[in-house]
Image: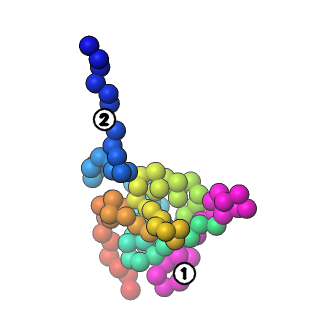
């Protein structure tokens, strides 16, 4: 008798897990992205991302993000890039971010 093959999730779907603890830095970056900010990657000549900058909707640069934090958010599917554009928040990222008061 043949063993059943493991199920493979297709089309990049991830299991629906809404309860994840994310760090304060991740929370801050996701909040900026939820308000309309973007993450702009800077690549080396080989095409690999070497640094990133988080830019708010007002044009200011958030200094809290580094390459490790960027990779962590990408691994959790909280951010994504479309058509080679800047990285923006995904629906998954919106689920992870907790609401904050806007101090304007």
Check disc 1: other Cα within 10 Å, few if <14, some if 14-19, many if 20+: few
Q: Is residue 11 above or below residue 66?
A: above
In the rendered image, the residue lying farthest to the front is: 1
Image position of 100 with respect to 51: above or below: below
Q: Quadrant of the C terminus?
A: bottom left
Quadrant for residue 79, please give it. bottom left
The reply, left or right, for residue 16 in relation to residue 75 is left
What residue did someone put label 2 on? 7
Residue farthest to the right, as pictured: 45
Mark 1, residue position: 60
Marks 2 and 1, the one that precedes in the sequence: 2
Q: Which residues are magenta?
A: 43-61
59 is within the stretch colored magenta: yes
Question: Residue 4: x, y in percent?
Answer: 28, 24
Mark 2 nearby-residue class (10 Å; few <14, some 14–19, many ≥20): few
Which label was assigned to residue 25? none
Mark 2 vs mark 1: give the one in front.
Answer: 2
Which one is nearer the viewer's eye here, 18 or 25? 18
């Amino acid at each position: 008798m043949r063993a059943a093959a493991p199920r493979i999730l297709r089309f990049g779907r991830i299991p629906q897990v809404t309860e994840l603890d994310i760090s304060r830095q991740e929370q801050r970056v996701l909040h900026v992205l939820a308000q309309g900010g973007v993450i702009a990657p800077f690549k080396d000549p080989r095409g690999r991302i070497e640094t990133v900058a988080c830019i708010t909707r007002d044009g200011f640069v958030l200094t809290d993000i580094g390459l490790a934090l960027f990779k962590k958010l990408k691994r959790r599917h909280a951010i994504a890039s479309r058509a080679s554009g800047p990285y923006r928040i995904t629906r998954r990222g919106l689920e992870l971010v907790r609401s904050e008061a806007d101090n304007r």
